[in-house]
Image (cartoon, rainbow, N blue to C red):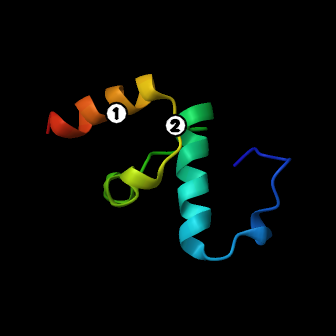
Amino acid sequence: MYNWSTDEKSFKNEIEREIWELEQMINFGLNEKKINEKKLRLYWDRFVIDPHRRRFLEMLLNAQ
């Protein structure tokens, strides 16, 4: 992950770090990684992402 302004050790638990990492991947690019669909569905309601991206991802998730 290429984020130099966030101290990843400051997260209270692993779940917070996973949510933050998924949000970063969605908002700023994947850096040749793949998003884990299971985690995406699990934390869906907790993401703070652009509404247009949210609708697009929702469309992709519901298309399966």
The residue drawn where x is 71% and y is 69% is: 11
Q: Is residue 64 above or below residue 6?
A: above
Image coords of residue 59 (percent x, y): 24, 29
| Circle 2 or circle 1, nearest the eye | 2
Q: Which residue is mark 1?
A: 57
Q: Residues within 10 Å of mark 1 (few under 14, many from 20)?
A: some
Compared across the picture, whether 31 is left or right of 62 comes to: right
The residue drawn where x is 37% and y is 51% is: 44
Give the amino acid at mark 2.
Answer: Ile
For marks 2 and 1, give the CA distance.
11 Å
Compared across the picture, whether 4 is left or right of 27 comes to: right
Compared across the picture, whether 16 is left or right of 5 comes to: left
The residue drawn where x is 17% and y is 37% is: 62
Image coords of residue 31 (percent x, y): 61, 38
Give the amino acid at mark 1.
Answer: Leu
Q: Is residue 36 above or below residue 30?
A: below
Q: Residues within 10 Å of mark 2 (few under 14, many from 20)?
A: few
Image coords of residue 4 (percent x, y): 85, 47
Report if the CB atoms under discs 2 and 1 are less than 8 Å apart. yes
Q: Is residue 53 above or below residue 38?
A: above
Element on which disc 1 rests: helix
Element on which disc 2 rests: loop
Q: Which residue is mark 2?
A: 49
Q: Is residue 40 above or below residue 58?
A: below
